[in-house]
């Protein structure tokens, strides 16, 4: 049931026009919650504070999305699609449930309940993005804080293997760049911005210091910084293509700042040494806490991928790649990661729920998906890269219903609907499947 509180809505504009303040964007891991949507004739006609990534998406949203229920590409009733879904999952010996980044806490919770009931392997979009970072956290821990603390305290911000100007367009404006905070009242002029990357980016153009390192050299550069921070002498003239004097200067900045924040992206976390790179960065940040306060944070790409990790953690004990086929959870990234399972042909049905990033699916996994029964459940604005056996369409949390999305710093942000009419959500569709499962 979707209703909005009167304090959120301003209906004074005209009889047909309303404004929703504090609308929330779930397009990237910033989960900005300060948008204002103007609603006319059941459409969003204006969206304030949206960025270049999300404005067009908001303006395409309507109160009545194109809900598609299909079997083998042919239109069917919602009941028939739900029955076919239950039929496929009921017969499967080794089903896979994957995705959840475009979902929200209610849908993610229902997906775990379904996985538990049918003994499925459940994996999230994290397994193809920040999975190596999660493995690194599990080995060495993390020094962390909320983005609010970064906004109010950080006078040194490092982006490593991340280009937020393109991927998270409001990150600098809201938390890490221009924004003034309690202990950095002059915003950008109180803050030193450092970018470490293998290529020039829009963010490196805006930085005070850009270290362009050689590909696959991050691990060496990070360990050199650890040595320099510890006051050791490094005899190499250059490491990773960077003069040792520049690395020494960065180590000094880290030692001398009031509050440092290192944000890292897939440029650091993916690749052959991904988890070891992240481990090295986390240890560098831990070392920096001997001198000052320093934190590390992942730049999460997909809207609620952090929520998917959280829900799986609190329900199964593990954040992704969880096998429930024996009636208790087993965790083994790689063995139980969705795309690896598909590439090896180790599942016999797949239920993709709110999957983001399917454009990155390897060819072998996609070929196998085309050979097995598949169910695709997602909001109307997504298209699968294959024709699924069953397609179900849901509304979008924060547009058509309440929900919760976890920001990249794991702060839960409540989502309010922009439209007040009822649209089926993934939670209700999954519950309908659960009710008729054999
Ligand atoms: S920065 Fe991300 S969450 Fe914020 S408005 Fe842009 S796309 Fe949405």
Image (spheres, rainbow, N blue to C red):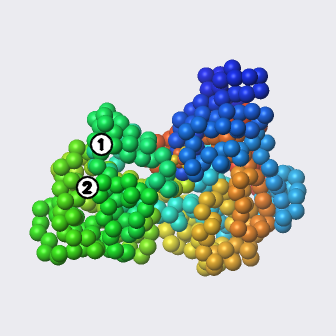
Q: Residue at x 55, y 69 (%)?
A: 336
Q: Secondary structure at mark 1?
A: helix
> Crowdedness of circle 1 by 10 Å Cα count: few (<14), some, many (20+)?
some
Instruction: Name the residue carrying label 1.
Output: 189
Name the quarter where the C terminus is drawn: bottom right
Q: Residue at x 39, y 39 (%)?
A: 179
Q: Secondary structure at mark 2?
A: helix
Vertical placement of residue 237 versus 404, above or below: below
Residue 387 in the image: state x and y as whole percent: 77, 68
Q: Residue at x 57, y 74 (%)?
A: 340
**Mark 1 to mark 2 CA distance (whole Å):** 26 Å
Q: Residue at x 74, y 76 (%)?
A: 371
Numbered badge on residue 286: 2
Residue 113 in the image: state x and y as whole percent: 63, 52
Name the quarter where the N terminus is drawn: top right
Numbered badge on residue 48: none
Answer with mark 1 or mark 2, whichever residue precedes in sequence: 1
Residue 326 seen in this snapshot: no
């Amino acid at each position: 049931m979707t209703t909005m509180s009167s304090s959120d809505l301003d209906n004074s504009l005209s009889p047909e026009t309303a404004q929703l303040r504090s609308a929330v964007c779930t397009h990237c891991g910033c989960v900005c919650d300060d948008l204002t949507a103007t609603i006319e004739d059941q459409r969003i006609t204006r969206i304030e504070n949206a960025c270049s990534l999300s404005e067009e998406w908001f303006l395409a949203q309507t109160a009545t999305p194109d809900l598609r229920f299909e079997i083998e590409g042919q239109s069917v009733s919602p009941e028939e699609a739900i029955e076919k879904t239950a039929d496929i999952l009921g017969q499967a010996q080794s089903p896979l449930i994957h995705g959840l980044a475009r979902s929200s806490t209610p849908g993610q919770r229902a997906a775990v309940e379904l996985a538990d009931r049918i003994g499925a392997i459940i994996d999230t979009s994290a397994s193809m993005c920040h999975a190596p970072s999660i493995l690194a956290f599990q080995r060495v821990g993390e020094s962390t804080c909320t983005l609010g603390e970064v906004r109010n305290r950080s006078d040194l911000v490092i982006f490593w293997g991340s280009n937020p100007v393109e991927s998270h367009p409001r990150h600098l404006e809201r938390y890490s760049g221009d924004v003034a905070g309690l202990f950095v009242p002059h915003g950008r002029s109180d803050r030193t911005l450092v970018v470490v990357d293998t290529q020039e980016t829009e963010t490196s153009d805006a930085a005070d210091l850009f270290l362009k390192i050689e590909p696959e050299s991050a691990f060496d550069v990070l360990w050199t910084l650890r040595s320099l921070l510890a006051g050791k002498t490094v005899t190499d003239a250059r490491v990773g293509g960077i003069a040792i004097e520049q690395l020494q200067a960065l180590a000094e900045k880290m030692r001398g700042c009031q509050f440092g924040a290192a944000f890292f992206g897939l440029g650091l976390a993916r690749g052959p040494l991904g988890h070891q790179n992240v481990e090295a960065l986390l240890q560098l940040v831990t070392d920096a806490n001997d001198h000052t306060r320093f934190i590390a944070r992942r730049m999460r790409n997909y809207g609620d991928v952090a929520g998917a990790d959280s829900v799986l953690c609190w329900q199964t004990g593990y954040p992704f790649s969880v096998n429930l086929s024996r009636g208790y959870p087993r965790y083994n990234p790689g063995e139980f990661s969705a795309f690896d399972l598909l590439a090896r042909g180790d599942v016999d049905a797949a239920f993709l729920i709110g999957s983001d990033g399917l454009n990155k699916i390897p060819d072998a996994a996609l070929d196998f998906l085309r050979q097995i029964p598949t169910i695709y459940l997602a909001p109307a604005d997504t298209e699968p890269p294959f024709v699924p056996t069953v397609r179900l369409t849901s509304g979008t949390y924060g547009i058509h219903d309440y929900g919760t999305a976890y920001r990249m710093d794991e702060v839960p942000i409540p989502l309010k609907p922009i439209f007040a009419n009822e649209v089926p959500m993934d939670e209700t569709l999954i519950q309908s499947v659960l009710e008729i499962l054999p």
